[in-house]
Image (tube, helix red, strand yellow):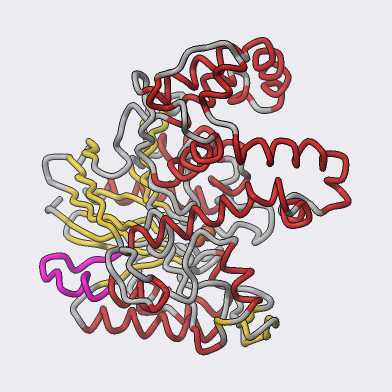
Amino acid sequence: MQELTFYLVTDPHYFATEIGAEGEAYEARSRVDQKCIAETGAIIDAAFSRLAEDRDTQLILIPGDLIFNGEKASHLGFREKLRALQKAGKRILLITARHDYSDWSCGYRGAEEVEVEHTERSELRDLYAEFGFSDAIATWEGDGLSYVSQLADGVRLLALNCDGDTRSFKGLWPEQLEWAKQQIEKAHADGQYIFAMTHYPLLPGSAVMNLIGDAKLTDWEKTADFLADAGLELIFTGHMHMQSLTEHLSANGNKITDICTGSLVGCPAYYRKVTLSPDGTVTVHSIPTGEFDWKDKGDKTSAEYFQWRFDRMITDLIDAMAFDFPFFAAKFGGEEKMKNVRGVVTFFGKGLQKWTIGSLARLLCIKVDPSVRDILLKDIGLAFVRNIFVGNEPYVKGTPIYDAMEKILNRLSFVLKPLGKKLGEKQPVLRDLKTFILSMIGDEDQRDYEAVVTIHK
Ligand SMILES: [Fe+2]
Ligand SMILES: [Fe+2]
């Protein structure tokens, strides 16, 4: 295979603001979202112009969630941005995902959500024909949205749509997997290297993602085993708006690596530049989305703005525990369903506003490093959640935060052990709660941004 470099950009979620992106309804929607919405045009234009400036790298892969939520106007606007990149010499290959179609789409004006023209899933192939579908060397007839593309001499892309049944099944169909296996075998028989992209991650990018239904493909273990044993080593994914590099070893000893990239338009807001080399190494480099102009940014840099938006989403929820139970309950099934836990939620919500690591340590009669004593539990909780998405979680063994957390968890082991045993019956990853929690706050590998992966060329 010859050396090949490409950009991997995902989840741009373009929103055509001309259909309405202002007022209370927009603000309410925006506050609970990791991604910036009205800003997408400005962000994408700035990032795409930087891609266009790179004359050495022509290939761009986009694994889905092209637009906000099925609006036809957003597709038409986004397609123009892609066409401008094409004019600058880029070859763009994409797949679509569940945000790209909808039975109902809207813009936001004042207090109202105003219905706008939506997009059917059956329209997507034609809408984006020139971005992978029309020059594919093979297409899975089952959906017309999964295909194989020849990227360069000796390298192919297996692009797999994973909308599933468009409801609870978010996986790859048995027939689709069989087709994928044939394509992998055919590529190898033809002397071609082949790697894949899907929208949903193949592998959970953090221990907690085992508990979140759509954080990975449905039946991911079976699918990962199947694809690894079929000879697939590398898969690029999106959807979770997180940076992660995760490996899986099949029962037969075959390794597959899932490189999940953050959304272009939401914290941590990165894209990747990847080089496959003839010596069998894949170099993964990450690039921040970068600066963009926006009226409400104030003096924040883009990176600060993205983080502020993410933090606001989480702190709103923590604050609501203490001060706005209806808002909090609405996120977990409604006030009626949550009414029995209202007192507990409010108690902990108020506590989180004032408890520090030091006060918790005193309560549990343990010593923690002075440097972490004054950190509010609210702030460290926010950092833990944010870091799962940002990746390269920094609180590894030996850091004062890790040591404090380990001591706290050890002291609580009389509760955590029996609880883990019970929860572990349904969800094995929870069997050892201490390991589960510590694995989420510190990542010893630190490969979520920069990595070299070895492949069998
Ligand atoms: Fe998604
Ligand atoms: Fe997304």
Q: Does 295 sit left or right of 172 as displayed?
A: left
**In the image, farthest residue toward the bottom:** 18
> Above or below — where is 388 with respect to 114?
above
> Above or below — where is 76 with respect to 263?
below
> Above or below — where is 354 with respect to 412?
below
> Above or below — where is 36 with respect to 421?
below
The magenta segment: 48-60
Q: Residue at x 70, y 82 (%)?
A: 112
Residue 124, given in percent of the width and then of the height, sits at: 51, 76
Give the camera-side residue of 346 and 446.
346
Q: Does 416 sit left or right of 241 as displayed?
A: right
Instruction: Note whether residue 226 is visible.
Output: no
Q: Residue at x 81, y 54 (%)?
A: 334
Residue 69, given in percent of the width and then of the height, sits at: 57, 72
Q: Residue at x 37, y 71 (%)?
A: 298
| Magenta stretch holds residue 51 | yes
Residue 90, given in percent of the width and then of the height, sits at: 22, 74
Q: Residue at x 46, y 82 (%)?
A: 127
